[in-house]
Image (tube, rainbow, N blue to C red):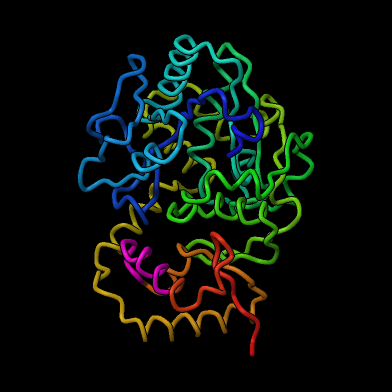
Amino acid sequence: MLHAALYGDEDQAVILTYAWDRLLVDPVPGPRGAHDFTDLEAVTPSVWSVPATARPVAPAGSTLPRLAAELPQILALLDPSHGVEGVTRQLEELLAHLAPESIDLLDVGGDILARGDEPTLKSPLADAVTLAACCQVNAPVRLLVAGPGLDGELSAEDLRPLLGPVVHTLTAQDVAPVGNVLEWHPSEATGMLAATARGTRGICEVRDAGLPVPLRDEGPRVHEVDLDEALSHNTLARAITATTTLDEAEAHSREICGFSEIDYERNKALWLKDQPSAPLDEGAVLRQVDEFESEARTRGVTHTTFRHLTEVLHLNGSQRSDLRHLLLNRRPEQYAAPLWRIPDAT
């Protein structure tokens, strides 16, 4: 979406990304490495691409093969199992192999700019690893923050002094080529980014904790941020620069941030393991949705995500698509793609 907006669609981009789909898709806590997939294709000694034919090794799950089937870009696996040193090596090998014209590090929401002690911070580790690695490669890397505040961690107000110039404001036209992907992909931040680009405004409730995220005019904006300034602000990224394992990086996160997001996933996975998976009781589900919407209105909420609805209704993650199908069939007027609109009281 952003590559086409900034560079056009003539040149094929390589997107280096984590296979870290969280528990809604992947019941195994933490990110997946190359050994967690079959049929990956070697790009360099440390970098593997994920083709449409790749499959996660059970019980792991991943959206990357389906993304590879539906997107024109090449998806390559960012594997943090060897810490920041390992990710730096992957970046250096890929840069030497591809000799790219430009290198962009994209974060949706802006939590890559966190200090580490913010009480609203939820998932600093992946961003810190990537930021630390990008600051060590011998090549110019441009840091871009899209949708300030849309990840529900740092507010747009807190981020504003740290942001540089706007390089692009996404529009409905920019979103159109990936519209089909957003119909099924569970990323809340990307979904809200697309929704704001399409003109949706209000308050969106997200995640299992029900965080309220404002959908405002600044939502579809993409800012450039000085990479070195971001590193100087991010305590965790500076601390993990020399790590050679993910466990080391995780230990620093516990020390600096007071928690590890993978620990949170481990604990939640134990709880989810006991959640039943059965066909939806449509009548009961619709009544629960009515109750949720009534309560959400009292909180000023105007929209939510299907991920949040799945969790707030205590459904199994595999039932998310069934819930979405039910609601779109029964109440299509409430669909504000790819979000769910909370109607006004009647």
321 in magenta = yes
Which part of the image, by quadrant, shows the N terminus? top right
Q: Count of labels shown?
A: 0
Residue 218 x, y percent position in the rendering: 75, 50
Q: Residue at x 40, y 53 (%)?
A: 264
Residue 72 x, y percent position in the rendering: 46, 33
Image quadrant assignment for residue 268: bottom left
Residue 191, compared with residue 146, is above or below; it is below
Q: Residue at x 42, y 67 (%)?
A: 324
Which part of the image, by quadrant, shows the C terminus? bottom right
Residue 88, compared with residue 70, is above or below; it is above
Q: Mainly helix, strand or loop, the magenta region?
A: helix
In this view, which residue lies farthest toward the bottom?
Answer: 346
In this view, which residue lies farthest toward the left?
Answer: 58
Residue 238, compared with residue 182, is above or below; it is above
Q: Residue at x 40, y 68 (%)?
A: 325
Classify residue 263 as left or right of residue 131: left
| 50 or 135, nearer to the observer | 50
69 in magenta = no
Identify the magenta region. Answer: 315-326
Classify residue 201 as left or right of residue 333: right
| 227 or 95, nearer to the observer | 95
Classify residue 151 as left or right of residue 277: right
Classify residue 2 as left or right of residue 92: right
Residue 138, compared with residue 171, is above or below; it is above
Residue 230 x, y percent position in the rendering: 67, 31
